[in-house]
Amino acid sequence: MSTVRVRFAPSPTGSLHIGSARTALFNFVFARHQGGVFVLRIEDTDMKRSLQVHEHSITRDLHWLGLSADEGPDVGGAYGPYRQSERAHIYEEGVLRLLAEGHAYRCFCSQERLDALKEDQLARGRMPKYDRRCLGLTEEEVQQRLAAGEQATVRFRIPQGQVDYQDMIRGRLSFSADVIGDFIIKRTDGGFSYNYAVVMDDMGMKITHVIRGEDHVTNTARQLLLFQAFGVEPPTYAHHSMIHAPDGGKLSKRHGATSIGEFRDLGYLPEAMVNYLALLGWHPSDERELFRLPELVQEFTMDRVSKSPAVFDRDKLNWLNGVYVRGLTPEDLYRRVEPFLLEAGISLQPVQREVVAAAIQSNLVTLDDAPEYAEVFTAEVDLADSPHLGVLAAPGVDQVFELLEEALAQFTEEFLSVDEGRAVMHTVAAACKEKGLKGKSIYMPLRVALTGRPVNYP
RNA sequence: GCCCCCAUCGUCUAGCGGCCUAGGACAUCGCCCUUUCAAGGCGACGGCGGGGAUUCGAAUUCCCCUGGGGGCACCA
């Protein structure tokens, strides 16, 4: 059996959307599960909308999620180039061959005529479809018009019959070929169309499994026909469902963050994103819910991917993020939270870092919540004299400082035992209550300052 | 308009003819723990879109309806 080769093929017209990220994830874990290869291909045939910056951000986001490609524009590989814009010569050869074998033909119809045709068909309740006016052109006529400098496209000639295939997720799917019009494979500007380029690439890159969104199911028929024309065995297809917004529609900015980059900036952990995305439309064979990439690779099978669309649920993502945040060591937590703290103008002393991180850990949903909770540990008050408060200086502590000093007079060690600390804390906390201080600003800092332990009952 | 797909708690889902008085998770609510806020523990609420058919038996199979989604480009 040949090795499994899958590809993730985004077009660099924007940043990595969560829907695409899920597609990439499914491809990645499916391939890894089979010991296969994960290829990244950049579909930039639309020069007008494709941008380098987007390609870079997509690559960066994939890397952040842990879905780095085995072959791709950055890492190379034996089946490159991996950008469609660099594969024109390959596409050209294919077009010539289809033309020579009668699977394709030149079309001189103007945009105006095509628009009118479509409008008319729609008005008559018919499916828009090219009427093959140029199919009957003689070779002489074609050459003559070409020589005269007339603009032409190349259309793929759709054969008669049925297109059937077995989808790994959806089962048997079939289309009648006559609902498909002779689509353009080469444009007048010399560019090549998506459906055509995809087939040339999947063929050339020896792709064995195409895992993509449901929005491509009808494209599959066209692509299958192209494979047939080339006499090449097509890959196996798997079309997963789409991600919907809570209102049932398409997920858009209106519903909040939609791209991986945005979630990263909001303080979500890649582990949580990966886990959440995996659970959207896929489920394990038992009732576990927590999966990191390696476990996913081990567990993932296509037969457990859902056919129906899934609504993106921020609450569940939040819960997962909290789970992963709580699983971090204080050291790791601090490292990941530091940028958010600095961004908010909070800089902690080295001695404070881990203990503060541990103290606020269970409060965090996202890393971005850190400043709100760490704030109480950053008062501008000089308590350096006290061995107990050397670590922390909270605004609340400031207000009960005298009382605290008194209570602490008998102790000399840096941190008190938990019981001693609790006793002092309760005395001081009672005073705080009298003064109407918010518990939030006093209890945690106090506990941490006195005992060096953020948890309630260690 | 035409073609294709989908349909279990609010949400993600388990279920592949009897194990289902439909299981889990998130969210919500309650209790416990706790002189803060969380986290955690325990519990509650809550669902097979409708109609036929097959069968001794249907959430599970078939058909129709309804609803939702996708596609029908010189975009990808």
Image: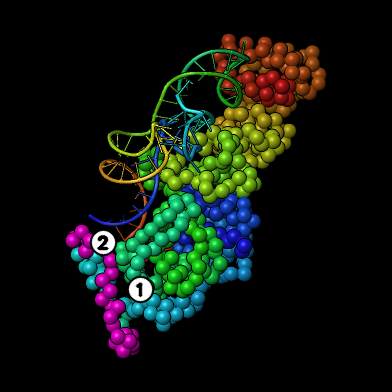
Q: Quadrant of residue A37?
A: bottom right
Report if residue A131 lies within the magenta region. yes
Q: Amino acid at mark 1?
A: Arg
Quarter of the image where the C terminus of chain A is located: top right
Instruction: Indicate whether A96 appears above or below A41.
Output: below
Per the rendered image, the range of residues in magenta is A121-148
Q: Which circle's residue, 2 or 1, is located before the other in the chain?
A: 2
Do marks 2 and 1 share a subunit?
yes
Q: Which residue is mark 2?
A: A127
Most foreground residue, A122 or A353: A122
A111 horizontally vs A458: left or right? left
Residue at 26% over, 71% down:
A131
* In the foreground, A352 or B9: B9
Residue A237: horizontal and vertical position, in percent? 48, 58
* Quadrant of residue A36 within the rendered picture: bottom right
Q: Position of residue A248 (x, y in %)?
A: 37, 41
Residue pointed to by mark 1:
A157
Q: Is residue A16 visible?
A: no
